[in-house]
Amino acid sequence: MNSRNKTYDIVYIGFFAVLMGICSWISIPMAVPFTMQTFGVFVTVGILGGKRGMAAVLVYILLGIAGIPVFSGMRGGIGVLLNTTGGYIVGFLFSALAMWGMEKMLGRKGAMLLVSMAVGLVICYVFGTAWFMVVYMKSNEAVGIGTVLGWCVIPFIVPDLAKIGLAYILTRRLRQYVPQ
């Protein structure tokens, strides 16, 4: 890879990390805020591919850890990750990793991209919900999985599927403009 390609990669990774931050600012406060972050993750990995997409998600998380207000509610800092909803942010990394793995094994064409986004969403739900339960029960009373799913997953399923659909459409239209 020549230095020009590396420069482009750095620019794309930085741009999409910022895009995820902007998507997080579009937020409706709830127990787990409704944001466009998952949309940002899916568009990022969809357009950039697994390796660069994963790097952009990691940069986004590291920017937030460093205190730059890239998380929902224009917040930043390690405290956000250590809170009840921090697992969903960390789950973005595992979502991107799963999408990258599926890309390597099955490709990025057509329905496979859509399936990888759905798998990434499920992974984010599982990781984030488990994290939510652990952190919540440390500072509050015990809570059942059904209650946590009612707070953290069920209200988000339809909007998240709509975000996947939108991310898929944008990815299919914009990917041609980003060198792979």
Image: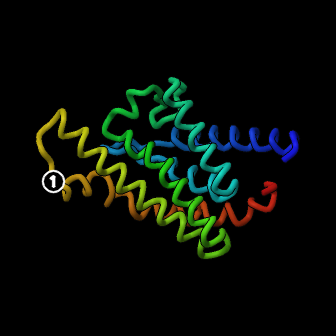
Q: Residue at x 51, y 49 (%)?
A: 36
Q: Tell me the SS state at disc 1.
A: loop
The amino acid type, in three-letter code, at marker 1 is Gly
- Crowd around label 1: few <14 · some 14–19 · many ≥20 (10 Å): few
* Residue 108 drawn at (x, y percent): 66, 68
Q: Which residue is drawn at 67% across and 61% down?
A: 170
Q: Residue at x 74, y 59 (%)?
A: 174
**Rendered position, 153 above or below 80:** below
Query: Left or right: where does residue 84 sit relative to residue 88?
Result: left
Hey, which residue is sitting farthest left in the picture? Answer: 141
Q: Give the residue number, with chain letter if any, for mark 1.
A: 144
Query: Left or right: where does residue 132 sit relative to residue 27?
Result: left
Q: How many marks?
A: 1
Q: Which of 3 and 69 is in front in this view?
A: 3
Res. 12 image quadrant: top right
* Residue 117 drawn at (x, y percent): 53, 63
Image color mode: rainbow
**Rendered position, 154 above or below 134:** below
* Residue 48 drawn at (x, y percent): 70, 54
Q: Residue at x 63, y 43 (%)?
A: 56
* Residue 109 drawn at (x, y percent): 67, 73
